[in-house]
Amino acid sequence: MKCRRCSKPAVINMRQHKLALCGDHFLEWIPAQTQRFIKKYEMFGSGKTILVAVSGGKDSLSLWDLLLRLGYEAQGLYIDLGISEEGYSSSSLAKVDRFVEKREGARLKVVDVKEEYGKTIPQLARERPGQKTCSLCGLVKRYIMNEAALEEGAILATGHNLDDEAAVLLQNVLHWQTGYLLRQAPVLLSTHPRLARKVKPFFRFYERETAAYAILRGIDYIYEECPFATGATTIFYKELLNRLEERSRGAKLQFYLSFLRAREKGLFLRRLPPQGAERISSVDERLELGECERCGQPTTAPGLCAFCRLWKVAEAEVR
Ligand code: Q46
Ligand code: ZN
Ligand code: ZN
């Protein structure tokens, strides 16, 4: 197969776009597309600080690399979860450190969960056999990412790709999780002074495209999945979607883009009973956001937010 732009041998064929490209043209195409998505979805403008949450994997490191190349003020955030199983956390941090060493001016902030809060994620999970490790970990990561972005006065960017987003969408649709569907978007606005704006500039790229970018750019990333990811339901949904994609070119992209269009048209808005004048409100709007008594982050629960409740119980157990 030949490159559509120069007829050299193609290194990637993106069937959903009917576009095959050689390495050089692919390395031009990815940044141009990313820039287009940043503008189209009004993610951020130049002059803003972007905090890229990096795990050592291909998506997040590629995103950081690309934003730096595009000239954005992009800093990295690595959360050390203390996963010693298969040396996961230390190997992933080593990849991030290598990445930083090679890029002059790249600034990295590291938050060590054990140092900050007293326990690693596996320790925390072992004490709560009824809860899934990934749910605990997700809660901790989301909280730390938000705090770090607020501290830096930055917009938080994550490397989620289309395969990640479509898998979560499928999961949410199968359970008709309207609350989650309402909050699933490439841009999450800051709806409270203690909530950072969150963006996903890679959300329209297939996973194989971000992997190809990392390889062609010579980015050394951690190939192994986190040991706790084995058997995770998202992996199963990704496989299902890949089977669908094999049968129907572009199915994953269409699934997600059609969802965004439906969301924009108000499919997930709920009409409330008239109060004076009838009005339409989102499910989110109806949730009263209070502030956590301990950390001040917005929460729908009275008293402490879920993160502070988690660590308060952990502290009580230590005593
Ligand atoms: S790091 Fe954490 Fe993931 Fe590992 S424990 Fe689960 S959520 S799988 S992206
Ligand atoms: Zn070419
Ligand atoms: Zn709190």
Image (tube, rainbow, N blue to C red):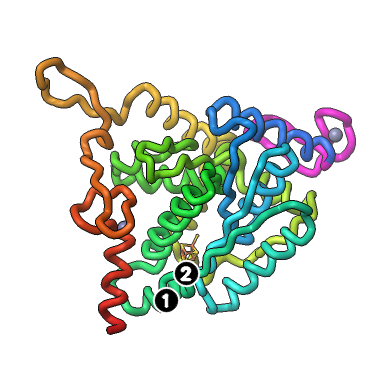
Q: Secondary structure at mark 1?
A: loop
Rendered-image quarter of ligand 2: top right
**Is 150 inside the magenta-drawn segment?**
no
Q: Which span of residues is magenta-colored?
A: 1-23
Q: Mark 1 belongs to which amino acid?
A: Lys
Q: Which mark is residue 113?
A: 2
Question: What is the CA distance from the residue labelled 1 to the residue labelled 2?
Answer: 7 Å
Among numbered discs 1 and 2, the one appearing first in the sequence = 2
Q: Who's the residue at 30% across and 31% down the image? A: 268
- What residue would you read off at disc 1? 119
Image location of residue 229, percent across then percent down: 49, 65
Count the marks: 2
Q: Nearer the viewer, residue 303 or 2?
A: 303
The answer to whether mark 1 and mark 2 are in CB contact below 8 A is yes
Q: Residues within 10 Å of mark 2 (few under 14, many from 20)?
A: some
Q: Tell me the quarter of the image containing the N terminus.
A: top right
Q: Where does the image place residue 55, in percent across and percent down from the top left?
A: 58, 60
